[in-house]
Amino acid sequence: MLGEFKPGQAYQHIERGQHLERQGHLDEAMLEFKHAVEADPSIAAAHNALGHHYQRKGLLTKAADEFRSAALLSSDYKSHFNLGRVLTELEQHEEAADAFRHCLSTNEHDPSARYELAYVQCAQGEFSDALAQFQSLMAEYPEDWELGFAMANCHMGLRDCAAAEQTLRQALRRAPPSADTSAAHEALLVAIRHQEFPSQGQLGLKAPLYAEYGVICLGSSHDDGLDVPIYQNHTFTYRDVAVTLSRLLALLKEYGWQFTALVGVDKASMPLAIAASLLVDVPVLSIEQLRKHDFALVVLALGTQPELLEVTLEHLPSRMLSFALCLNWMPDQGLPTDIVGVHSSGECVLPWQRLRKRSAEAAATSILRALTTVPEEDNLSQQIAYYTQEHKLLRFLNLPPGLHQARPAT
Protein backbone atom coordinates (compact mmCIF):
# COMPACT_ATOMS: atom_id res chain seq x y z
CA MET A 1 0.00 0.00 0.00
CA LEU A 2 1.25 3.48 -0.91
CA GLY A 3 0.34 4.76 2.52
CA GLU A 4 2.78 2.34 4.11
CA PHE A 5 5.75 3.63 2.14
CA LYS A 6 8.31 5.69 4.04
CA PRO A 7 10.04 7.87 1.44
CA GLY A 8 11.79 9.98 4.06
CA GLN A 9 13.49 6.96 5.58
CA ALA A 10 14.25 5.58 2.10
CA TYR A 11 16.11 8.74 1.03
CA GLN A 12 18.04 8.74 4.30
CA HIS A 13 19.20 5.20 3.56
CA ILE A 14 20.10 6.20 0.00
CA GLU A 15 22.19 9.13 1.23
CA ARG A 16 23.97 6.94 3.79
CA GLY A 17 24.58 4.32 1.13
CA GLN A 18 26.09 6.87 -1.24
CA HIS A 19 28.30 8.20 1.56
CA LEU A 20 29.51 4.68 2.36
CA GLU A 21 30.22 4.07 -1.33
CA ARG A 22 32.44 7.14 -1.50
CA GLN A 23 34.35 5.82 1.52
CA GLY A 24 34.78 2.42 -0.12
CA HIS A 25 32.50 0.53 2.33
CA LEU A 26 30.60 -1.25 -0.40
CA ASP A 27 28.93 -4.04 1.58
CA GLU A 28 27.65 -1.58 4.15
CA ALA A 29 26.40 0.63 1.31
CA MET A 30 24.54 -2.29 -0.24
CA LEU A 31 22.78 -2.92 3.06
CA GLU A 32 21.64 0.70 3.15
CA PHE A 33 20.21 0.44 -0.34
CA LYS A 34 18.35 -2.72 0.69
CA HIS A 35 16.83 -0.78 3.57
CA ALA A 36 15.90 2.01 1.16
CA VAL A 37 14.01 -0.43 -1.10
CA GLU A 38 12.26 -1.92 1.92
CA ALA A 39 11.25 1.53 3.19
CA ASP A 40 9.87 2.67 -0.15
CA PRO A 41 9.94 0.26 -3.12
CA SER A 42 8.57 2.98 -5.42
CA ILE A 43 11.90 4.83 -5.66
CA ALA A 44 13.72 3.83 -8.86
CA ALA A 45 17.05 5.22 -7.66
CA ALA A 46 17.10 2.77 -4.75
CA HIS A 47 16.51 -0.20 -7.06
CA ASN A 48 19.21 1.01 -9.47
CA ALA A 49 21.73 1.43 -6.65
CA LEU A 50 20.95 -1.98 -5.17
CA GLY A 51 21.08 -3.56 -8.64
CA HIS A 52 24.61 -2.24 -9.21
CA HIS A 53 25.80 -3.85 -5.97
CA TYR A 54 24.19 -7.17 -6.83
CA GLN A 55 25.86 -6.96 -10.24
CA ARG A 56 29.20 -6.21 -8.60
CA LYS A 57 28.88 -9.38 -6.54
CA GLY A 58 27.93 -11.47 -9.56
CA LEU A 59 24.32 -11.90 -8.40
CA LEU A 60 23.04 -11.17 -11.87
CA THR A 61 19.49 -12.49 -11.51
CA LYS A 62 18.94 -10.36 -8.42
CA ALA A 63 20.49 -7.39 -10.21
CA ALA A 64 18.15 -7.88 -13.16
CA ASP A 65 15.15 -7.95 -10.81
CA GLU A 66 16.17 -4.62 -9.28
CA PHE A 67 16.89 -2.97 -12.62
CA ARG A 68 13.60 -4.30 -14.00
CA SER A 69 11.77 -2.76 -11.04
CA ALA A 70 13.55 0.55 -11.67
CA ALA A 71 12.65 0.43 -15.37
CA LEU A 72 8.97 -0.17 -14.55
CA LEU A 73 8.97 2.73 -12.11
CA SER A 74 10.82 5.10 -14.42
CA SER A 75 11.02 5.26 -18.19
CA ASP A 76 14.39 6.98 -18.02
CA TYR A 77 17.44 5.99 -20.04
CA LYS A 78 19.57 4.90 -17.06
CA SER A 79 17.17 2.29 -15.70
CA HIS A 80 16.65 0.61 -19.06
CA PHE A 81 20.36 0.73 -19.94
CA ASN A 82 21.26 -0.92 -16.63
CA LEU A 83 18.63 -3.57 -17.27
CA GLY A 84 19.88 -4.21 -20.80
CA ARG A 85 23.48 -4.64 -19.68
CA VAL A 86 22.74 -7.22 -16.99
CA LEU A 87 20.30 -9.10 -19.25
CA THR A 88 23.07 -9.28 -21.83
CA GLU A 89 25.32 -10.88 -19.22
CA LEU A 90 22.52 -13.34 -18.47
CA GLU A 91 22.21 -14.03 -22.23
CA GLN A 92 18.56 -12.99 -22.16
CA HIS A 93 19.11 -11.25 -25.45
CA GLU A 94 15.58 -10.56 -26.62
CA GLU A 95 14.61 -8.64 -23.48
CA ALA A 96 18.01 -6.93 -23.46
CA ALA A 97 17.44 -5.72 -27.02
CA ASP A 98 14.05 -4.30 -25.99
CA ALA A 99 15.71 -2.40 -23.14
CA PHE A 100 18.31 -0.85 -25.45
CA ARG A 101 15.65 0.02 -28.03
CA HIS A 102 13.83 1.88 -25.26
CA CYS A 103 17.03 3.81 -24.58
CA LEU A 104 17.26 4.73 -28.25
CA SER A 105 13.63 5.87 -28.25
CA THR A 106 14.73 8.66 -25.89
CA ASN A 107 18.01 9.36 -27.72
CA GLU A 108 18.33 7.66 -31.09
CA HIS A 109 21.94 8.74 -31.57
CA ASP A 110 23.28 7.54 -28.21
CA PRO A 111 26.48 5.59 -29.03
CA SER A 112 26.45 3.40 -25.92
CA ALA A 113 22.93 2.08 -26.50
CA ARG A 114 23.62 1.62 -30.22
CA TYR A 115 26.75 -0.41 -29.43
CA GLU A 116 24.99 -2.57 -26.86
CA LEU A 117 22.05 -3.23 -29.17
CA ALA A 118 24.40 -4.22 -31.98
CA TYR A 119 26.27 -6.55 -29.62
CA VAL A 120 22.99 -8.24 -28.66
CA GLN A 121 21.90 -8.48 -32.30
CA CYS A 122 25.18 -10.21 -33.12
CA ALA A 123 24.61 -12.66 -30.26
CA GLN A 124 21.11 -13.34 -31.62
CA GLY A 125 22.48 -14.10 -35.08
CA GLU A 126 21.17 -10.86 -36.62
CA PHE A 127 24.57 -10.26 -38.15
CA SER A 128 23.61 -7.89 -40.97
CA ASP A 129 21.73 -5.50 -38.65
CA ALA A 130 24.53 -5.62 -36.09
CA LEU A 131 27.19 -5.01 -38.73
CA ALA A 132 25.34 -1.97 -40.09
CA GLN A 133 25.16 -0.49 -36.60
CA PHE A 134 28.83 -1.14 -35.86
CA GLN A 135 29.82 0.37 -39.23
CA SER A 136 27.79 3.46 -38.41
CA LEU A 137 29.58 3.79 -35.09
CA MET A 138 32.95 3.25 -36.78
CA ALA A 139 32.23 6.14 -39.14
CA GLU A 140 31.67 8.36 -36.11
CA TYR A 141 34.46 6.97 -33.93
CA PRO A 142 37.23 5.80 -36.29
CA GLU A 143 39.78 5.81 -33.45
CA ASP A 144 37.90 3.06 -31.58
CA TRP A 145 39.82 0.00 -32.78
CA GLU A 146 37.62 -2.41 -30.81
CA LEU A 147 34.68 -1.59 -33.07
CA GLY A 148 36.62 -3.36 -35.80
CA PHE A 149 36.83 -6.44 -33.59
CA ALA A 150 33.03 -6.34 -33.18
CA MET A 151 32.52 -5.89 -36.92
CA ALA A 152 34.74 -8.89 -37.61
CA ASN A 153 32.52 -11.07 -35.42
CA CYS A 154 29.58 -10.10 -37.63
CA HIS A 155 31.55 -10.88 -40.79
CA MET A 156 32.39 -14.32 -39.37
CA GLY A 157 28.71 -14.87 -38.58
CA LEU A 158 27.93 -14.03 -42.21
CA ARG A 159 30.69 -16.48 -43.25
CA ASP A 160 32.70 -13.73 -44.91
CA CYS A 161 36.06 -14.72 -43.46
CA ALA A 162 38.06 -12.57 -45.89
CA ALA A 163 36.20 -9.45 -44.75
CA ALA A 164 36.72 -10.48 -41.13
CA GLU A 165 40.47 -10.84 -41.73
CA GLN A 166 40.72 -7.44 -43.43
CA THR A 167 38.70 -5.75 -40.68
CA LEU A 168 40.79 -7.31 -37.92
CA ARG A 169 44.07 -6.34 -39.56
CA GLN A 170 42.86 -2.74 -39.82
CA ALA A 171 41.71 -2.79 -36.19
CA LEU A 172 45.04 -4.14 -34.98
CA ARG A 173 46.90 -1.41 -36.86
CA ARG A 174 44.80 1.20 -35.04
CA ALA A 175 45.19 -0.38 -31.61
CA PRO A 176 47.38 1.61 -29.20
CA PRO A 177 50.56 -0.11 -27.96
CA SER A 178 49.11 -0.51 -24.48
CA ALA A 179 45.95 -2.31 -25.67
CA ASP A 180 45.36 -5.99 -24.97
CA THR A 181 45.00 -7.34 -28.50
CA SER A 182 45.33 -11.04 -27.71
CA ALA A 183 41.65 -11.80 -28.41
CA ALA A 184 41.78 -9.89 -31.68
CA HIS A 185 44.92 -11.77 -32.77
CA GLU A 186 43.22 -15.08 -31.99
CA ALA A 187 40.13 -14.00 -33.94
CA LEU A 188 42.41 -13.11 -36.86
CA LEU A 189 43.91 -16.60 -36.77
CA VAL A 190 40.41 -18.11 -36.80
CA ALA A 191 39.45 -16.02 -39.84
CA ILE A 192 42.62 -17.04 -41.70
CA ARG A 193 42.32 -20.72 -40.78
CA HIS A 194 38.74 -20.88 -42.06
CA GLN A 195 39.90 -19.59 -45.43
CA GLU A 196 42.20 -22.60 -45.81
CA PHE A 197 39.11 -24.72 -46.51
CA PRO A 198 37.47 -24.02 -49.88
CA SER A 199 33.98 -25.21 -48.93
CA GLN A 200 32.51 -24.60 -45.48
CA GLY A 201 29.93 -27.28 -46.16
CA GLN A 202 32.57 -30.00 -46.38
CA LEU A 203 34.07 -29.51 -42.93
CA GLY A 204 34.14 -32.66 -40.82
CA LEU A 205 35.43 -32.85 -37.23
CA LYS A 206 39.12 -32.45 -37.98
CA ALA A 207 38.72 -29.16 -39.86
CA PRO A 208 36.49 -27.28 -37.34
CA LEU A 209 38.75 -28.17 -34.41
CA TYR A 210 41.65 -26.73 -36.38
CA ALA A 211 39.81 -23.73 -37.84
CA GLU A 212 38.14 -22.60 -34.61
CA TYR A 213 40.81 -23.54 -32.06
CA GLY A 214 44.07 -24.31 -33.87
CA VAL A 215 43.93 -27.86 -32.49
CA ILE A 216 45.25 -31.13 -33.92
CA CYS A 217 42.83 -34.06 -34.20
CA LEU A 218 44.41 -37.50 -34.70
CA GLY A 219 41.48 -39.93 -34.77
CA SER A 220 41.59 -43.59 -33.81
CA SER A 221 41.29 -47.08 -35.26
CA HIS A 222 37.76 -46.53 -36.63
CA ASP A 223 38.88 -43.80 -39.06
CA ASP A 224 41.72 -43.09 -41.47
CA GLY A 225 43.11 -40.10 -39.57
CA LEU A 226 41.82 -37.66 -42.19
CA ASP A 227 38.06 -38.11 -42.04
CA VAL A 228 37.47 -38.31 -38.29
CA PRO A 229 33.89 -38.72 -36.99
CA ILE A 230 32.52 -37.93 -33.56
CA TYR A 231 32.70 -41.15 -31.56
CA GLN A 232 29.41 -41.92 -29.80
CA ASN A 233 29.00 -44.13 -26.71
CA HIS A 234 32.35 -45.70 -27.48
CA THR A 235 34.08 -48.44 -25.52
CA PHE A 236 37.77 -48.10 -26.32
CA THR A 237 39.95 -51.12 -26.96
CA TYR A 238 43.68 -51.24 -26.43
CA ARG A 239 44.02 -51.23 -30.23
CA ASP A 240 42.06 -47.94 -30.39
CA VAL A 241 44.47 -46.43 -27.89
CA ALA A 242 47.49 -47.81 -29.74
CA VAL A 243 46.41 -46.37 -33.10
CA THR A 244 45.96 -42.88 -31.65
CA LEU A 245 49.25 -43.18 -29.79
CA SER A 246 51.12 -44.29 -32.93
CA ARG A 247 49.82 -41.22 -34.79
CA LEU A 248 50.83 -39.02 -31.88
CA LEU A 249 54.37 -40.45 -31.88
CA ALA A 250 54.72 -39.85 -35.63
CA LEU A 251 53.61 -36.25 -35.17
CA LEU A 252 55.97 -35.65 -32.25
CA LYS A 253 58.84 -37.06 -34.30
CA GLU A 254 58.02 -34.78 -37.21
CA TYR A 255 58.01 -31.69 -35.01
CA GLY A 256 61.13 -32.78 -33.15
CA TRP A 257 59.83 -31.85 -29.73
CA GLN A 258 62.14 -32.77 -26.86
CA PHE A 259 60.02 -33.33 -23.77
CA THR A 260 61.60 -33.60 -20.36
CA ALA A 261 58.54 -34.91 -18.48
CA LEU A 262 55.06 -36.36 -18.85
CA VAL A 263 52.21 -35.40 -16.54
CA GLY A 264 49.06 -37.46 -16.09
CA VAL A 265 46.06 -35.23 -15.38
CA ASP A 266 44.23 -37.78 -13.23
CA LYS A 267 44.37 -41.41 -12.09
CA ALA A 268 42.58 -42.68 -15.19
CA SER A 269 45.25 -41.04 -17.36
CA MET A 270 48.23 -42.75 -15.72
CA PRO A 271 48.31 -45.90 -17.92
CA LEU A 272 48.49 -43.72 -21.03
CA ALA A 273 51.05 -41.39 -19.45
CA ILE A 274 53.27 -44.31 -18.38
CA ALA A 275 53.10 -45.92 -21.83
CA ALA A 276 53.92 -42.64 -23.56
CA SER A 277 56.79 -41.94 -21.16
CA LEU A 278 58.40 -45.27 -21.98
CA LEU A 279 58.08 -44.59 -25.71
CA VAL A 280 59.63 -41.10 -25.58
CA ASP A 281 62.03 -42.03 -22.76
CA VAL A 282 61.13 -39.31 -20.26
CA PRO A 283 59.81 -39.70 -16.71
CA VAL A 284 56.26 -39.25 -15.48
CA LEU A 285 56.35 -36.41 -12.96
CA SER A 286 53.81 -34.71 -10.74
CA ILE A 287 53.15 -31.01 -11.09
CA GLU A 288 55.12 -30.43 -7.87
CA GLN A 289 58.18 -32.12 -9.38
CA LEU A 290 58.27 -29.93 -12.48
CA ARG A 291 60.76 -27.10 -12.81
CA LYS A 292 60.62 -23.93 -14.88
CA HIS A 293 63.03 -25.27 -17.50
CA ASP A 294 60.95 -28.43 -18.14
CA PHE A 295 58.92 -29.06 -21.28
CA ALA A 296 56.01 -31.30 -20.28
CA LEU A 297 53.57 -33.36 -22.28
CA VAL A 298 50.33 -33.25 -20.30
CA VAL A 299 48.27 -36.39 -20.89
CA LEU A 300 44.52 -36.69 -20.38
CA ALA A 301 43.00 -40.06 -21.23
CA LEU A 302 39.26 -39.31 -21.02
CA GLY A 303 38.28 -35.68 -20.63
CA THR A 304 34.87 -35.23 -19.04
CA GLN A 305 35.53 -32.15 -16.89
CA PRO A 306 37.13 -29.14 -18.62
CA GLU A 307 37.62 -27.54 -15.20
CA LEU A 308 40.00 -30.34 -14.16
CA LEU A 309 42.20 -29.73 -17.19
CA GLU A 310 42.10 -25.96 -16.70
CA VAL A 311 43.22 -26.26 -13.06
CA THR A 312 46.04 -28.62 -14.02
CA LEU A 313 47.35 -26.34 -16.74
CA GLU A 314 47.09 -23.26 -14.52
CA HIS A 315 49.39 -24.84 -11.95
CA LEU A 316 52.09 -25.95 -14.37
CA PRO A 317 55.30 -23.97 -13.80
CA SER A 318 56.83 -24.89 -17.16
CA ARG A 319 56.21 -24.99 -20.90
CA MET A 320 53.83 -27.70 -21.94
CA LEU A 321 51.84 -29.35 -24.71
CA SER A 322 48.48 -30.93 -23.85
CA PHE A 323 47.10 -34.15 -25.32
CA ALA A 324 43.77 -35.91 -24.75
CA LEU A 325 43.02 -39.38 -26.05
CA CYS A 326 39.30 -38.63 -25.92
CA LEU A 327 37.49 -35.35 -25.19
CA ASN A 328 33.98 -35.90 -23.90
CA TRP A 329 32.90 -32.26 -23.72
CA MET A 330 31.83 -29.77 -26.37
CA PRO A 331 34.51 -27.21 -27.27
CA ASP A 332 32.22 -24.33 -26.23
CA GLN A 333 32.13 -25.82 -22.70
CA GLY A 334 35.90 -25.58 -22.33
CA LEU A 335 38.94 -25.25 -24.54
CA PRO A 336 40.16 -28.51 -26.07
CA THR A 337 43.70 -29.74 -25.56
CA ASP A 338 46.41 -28.84 -28.08
CA ILE A 339 46.19 -32.36 -29.52
CA VAL A 340 42.99 -34.41 -29.47
CA GLY A 341 42.67 -38.08 -30.28
CA VAL A 342 38.91 -38.20 -30.76
CA HIS A 343 35.94 -36.13 -29.71
CA SER A 344 33.12 -38.18 -28.23
CA SER A 345 29.54 -37.83 -27.13
CA GLY A 346 27.61 -40.04 -24.76
CA GLU A 347 29.26 -42.54 -22.45
CA CYS A 348 32.84 -43.58 -23.22
CA VAL A 349 34.90 -46.21 -21.41
CA LEU A 350 38.66 -46.76 -21.44
CA PRO A 351 39.92 -50.36 -21.69
CA TRP A 352 41.61 -50.25 -18.28
CA GLN A 353 38.44 -48.97 -16.65
CA ARG A 354 36.73 -52.29 -17.31
CA LEU A 355 39.11 -54.02 -14.88
CA ARG A 356 39.26 -51.64 -11.94
CA LYS A 357 41.75 -53.68 -9.92
CA ARG A 358 44.35 -53.61 -12.67
CA SER A 359 47.39 -51.44 -11.96
CA ALA A 360 48.37 -48.50 -14.13
CA GLU A 361 51.65 -50.25 -14.99
CA ALA A 362 49.84 -53.39 -16.17
CA ALA A 363 47.46 -51.33 -18.32
CA ALA A 364 50.43 -49.45 -19.80
CA THR A 365 52.00 -52.80 -20.71
CA SER A 366 48.80 -53.74 -22.58
CA ILE A 367 48.92 -50.45 -24.49
CA LEU A 368 52.53 -51.11 -25.52
CA ARG A 369 51.71 -54.68 -26.52
CA ALA A 370 48.83 -53.47 -28.71
CA LEU A 371 51.13 -50.88 -30.27
CA THR A 372 53.43 -53.64 -31.59
CA THR A 373 50.50 -55.08 -33.57
CA VAL A 374 49.53 -51.81 -35.27
CA PRO A 375 50.99 -51.65 -38.82
CA GLU A 376 52.17 -48.35 -40.26
CA GLU A 377 49.29 -46.69 -42.06
CA ASP A 378 49.53 -46.16 -45.82
CA ASN A 379 48.37 -42.55 -45.48
CA LEU A 380 50.45 -41.63 -42.43
CA SER A 381 52.48 -39.12 -44.43
CA GLN A 382 49.23 -37.45 -45.52
CA GLN A 383 48.08 -37.26 -41.91
CA ILE A 384 51.31 -35.55 -40.92
CA ALA A 385 51.28 -33.23 -43.93
CA TYR A 386 47.76 -32.11 -43.02
CA TYR A 387 49.27 -30.09 -40.17
CA THR A 388 52.89 -29.60 -41.16
CA GLN A 389 52.23 -28.47 -44.75
CA GLU A 390 48.54 -27.67 -45.32
CA HIS A 391 47.16 -26.30 -42.04
CA LYS A 392 50.03 -24.89 -40.03
CA LEU A 393 48.48 -22.11 -37.93
CA LEU A 394 48.37 -24.23 -34.78
CA ARG A 395 47.77 -22.43 -31.52
CA PHE A 396 50.75 -23.93 -29.68
CA LEU A 397 53.34 -22.74 -32.17
CA ASN A 398 53.37 -19.24 -30.61
CA LEU A 399 52.94 -17.34 -33.84
CA PRO A 400 54.10 -13.71 -33.75
CA PRO A 401 51.56 -10.94 -34.32
CA GLY A 402 52.73 -10.59 -37.93
CA LEU A 403 51.58 -14.14 -38.62
CA HIS A 404 54.72 -15.22 -40.46
CA GLN A 405 54.66 -18.72 -41.81
CA ALA A 406 54.72 -21.17 -38.90
CA ARG A 407 57.62 -23.50 -38.37
CA PRO A 408 57.72 -26.50 -36.01
CA ALA A 409 58.69 -25.60 -32.45
CA THR A 410 61.93 -27.07 -31.13
Image: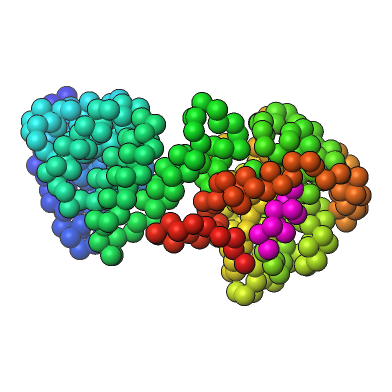
Q: Which residue is found at the position 70% from the left and 66% from the top?
A: 259
| Residue in view at x 84 percent, y 38 percent | 237
In the image, is 366 to the left or to the right of 166? right
Q: Nearer the viewer, residue 253 or 221?
A: 253
Q: Residue 232, percent across and down?
A: 70, 28
- Where are the magenta residues, as a range? 247-256
Say whether residue 410 is magenta: no
For this view, does 154 lie left or right of residue 253?
A: left
- Look at the image and say whether residue 249 sits in the magenta stretch: yes
Most prominent secondary structure in the magenta stretch? helix
Q: Is residue 5 visible?
A: no
Residue at (43, 44) in percent of width and height: 192
Front residue of 270/30: it is: 270
- Apparent side of residue 22 relative to residue 326 in the rendered image (left or right): left
- Residue 167 is situated, as x and y percent measured from the top left of the image, at 29, 44
222 or 21: which is nearer to us? 222
* Vertical side of 316 occupied by 336: above or below: above
Q: Residue at x 74, y 45 (%)?
A: 380
The image shows residue 40 at horizontal and vertical percentages of: 16, 35
Q: Position of residue 307 (x, y in %)?
A: 57, 48
